[in-house]
Amino acid sequence: MINKCLLPVAGYGTRFLPATKSSPKEMLPIVNKPLIEYAVQETVEAGLTRIGFVTGRGKRAIEDHFDKNYELEDQIRGTGKEDLLQATRDLIDQCEFSYTRQKEMKGLGHAILTGETLIGDEPFAVVLADDLCFGGDDGVLAQMVKLFDQYRCSIVAVEEVPDDSIHQYGVIAGEAIHEGIYRVTDMIEKPSIEDAPSNFGIIGRYILTPDIFELLRNTLPGKNGEIQITDALKMQAEQGCVLAYRFKGRRFDCGSIDGFVEATNFCYEKFYKNGL
Ligand code: UTP
């Protein structure tokens, strides 16, 4: 059974400068809730309550967000404003949070390897908060946990991406084994359109088996000089099995300004207007 989730939040978020100069990108709000809280909510809804953050310099606001703020809470006690904090308080009560720091930003693969100390020798999920996902009845991570119970191997969530943005994704080649489920045969990080083996791009939801750590230790810097999780997953796929899952639902790339604005408009219409 999976009960741990790693949230790498060490990146600089340079696309959002100057907003991210001294504030974490993951604390940017979509309407009135920070991105990181949506991520933790999805994780808890999938039944995973042991949350490990891989943080870096300037990310302390995330720790504070998932802690009590006695002075503020005292100030609003008994007023209608308490309701605004209730969902956050519920998450804090349900979860056990732990933190480790990535000292140098050497890529997502390196961030995940840094999180080994919080995970140990068990399968775990990885959620990137800048991909904001909404599923149907089940959230995207909950769908993947169900799939893991069936197949017991690493799983990446994929979606079809347009040709002109394929170079921004890790892209898979795979054989369909079931509707929406592919056995991965190849993976390329940020390929040109000519080299892309399909139009299925990996988004920020993973379930990984713990042998990934040893593979990451043996992964050399790849695209952009970073240690890429896709390179380690490719090795894992060659040695055993990695699945790609075409999730049900909608995902917003909140690491980009356009995706962030789109997500904001979507959430405002869908949730906030009717009382989030
Ligand atoms: P991104 O490359 O999208 O995030 O990494 P970034 O580097 O923060 O953003 P830009 O490109 O400068 O605007 C995807 C995720 O992986 C984490 C980031 O925090 C983000 O959630 N990450 C990336 C790390 O934790 N460590 C790294 O070394 C790299």
Image (cartoon, helix red, strand yellow):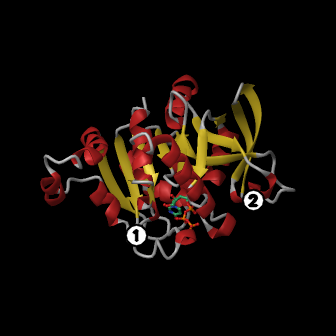
Helix, strand or loop under label 2: helix
What residue is pinned by disc 2?
Answer: 167
Assign a secondary structure to mark 1: loop
In the figure, 84 relative to 55: above or below?
above
Q: Position of residue 163 (x, y in %)?
A: 81, 53
The image quarter in which residue 259 lies = bottom right
Relative to residue 95, is residue 9 depicted above or below? below
Q: Is residue 23 left or right of residue 160?
A: left
Q: Nearer the viewer, residue 17 or 272?
A: 272
Q: Amino acid at mark 2?
A: His
Label 1 neighbour load within 10 Å: few <14, some 14-19, many 20+: some
What residue is drawn where x is 54% and y is 33%? Answer: 144
Q: Residue furthest right?
A: 194
Q: CA distance from mark 1 to mark 2?
A: 28 Å
Q: Does residue 168 appear to the left or right of 95 in the view shown?
A: right
The residue beneath circle 1 is 23
Where residue 242 appears, x then y in whole percent?
64, 37
